[in-house]
Image (cartoon, grey):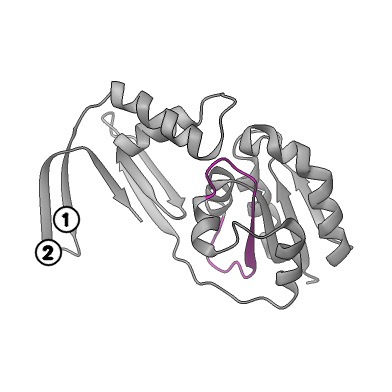
Amino acid sequence: MQKTEILIINPVSGKGRGEKLQSTIIKHAKDFYPHINVLITSEKNQAKEYIQSSAKQCSKLFVAGGDGTLNEVVRGFQTGHDFVLYSIPIGSGNDFSRSAGTLNKSIQEIFQASVNPKYVLCDIGRVRLQNSDNSVLETAFLSSCGSGFDATVSKFSNRKTFLTGLPLYISSVMKALVHLSFIDVEIILDHTDYFSGEKLLVTIG
């Protein structure tokens, strides 16, 4: 099977920054990979659907978006998928790209580096949630998964606003403080360590 490069762009990333940079991203992508398959998302979870349907044909996957877009993509990963993931950080937070060292690279530099890449290995987390009605949600996540205060901060940061980056985060923290509450948890680590009680937040990284 002939494999090809795939580019997924989320136009609403970074409060619309993705749409402004879309033509620039595609231009640089085609400069390095003339036959790259460009996929533009238009609704929630579409990035996940794209990778589910095209992963077997993928050799290099470029994702232009933020942490939310990357998390959508990894939720579409399955055992046996064999390609390299490249993040083009155009979101509001871009925590994953900051950790991976690509945050301050230009779009052209990211594509240039992919020609002779240096790989960074990263775990993908999986979480299974059981709701009060006994329904179960299973999903994957990249970088971190949180509940409590940081989840409330995330909820506010995802609402429509003109803010981005650090100002958006600080604003969301202030709003979350108004709704401050503790969560009652029981945590078992590696089948040995045990924690319980009311906590402000629980985060897995």
Tag 1: residue type?
Answer: Ile
For disc 1, the marked residue is 188
Predominant secondary structure, magenta span? loop
State yes or no: residue 151 in magenta. Answer: no
Tag 2: residue type?
Answer: Thr
Quadrant holding the N terminus: bottom right
**Going 71% across and 70% down the picture, which residue do you hit?**
114
- Marks 2/1 in contact by CB < 8 Å: the verdict is yes
For disc 2, the marked residue is 192
- Can you give x and y, in whole percent of width and height, for residue 115 in the image? 75, 74
**Going 38% across and 33% down the picture, which residue do you hit?**
153
Q: Which mark is residue 105?
A: none
Is residue 130 in view?
A: no
Local secondary structure at mark 2:
loop
Q: Residues within 10 Å of mark 1 (few under 14, many from 20)?
A: few
- Can you give x and y, in whole percent of width and height, for residue 141 in the image? 45, 51
**Going 71% across and 40% down the picture, which residue do you hit?**
18
User: Which segment did they paint magenta?
Assistant: 77-94
State yes or no: residue 81 in magenta. Answer: yes
Q: Is residue 175 above or below residue 28?
A: above
- Can you give x and y, in whole percent of width and height, for residue 165 in the image? 53, 40
Local secondary structure at mark 1:
strand
- Can you give x and y, in whole percent of width and height, for residue 175 in the image? 37, 24
Is residue 126 in view?
A: yes
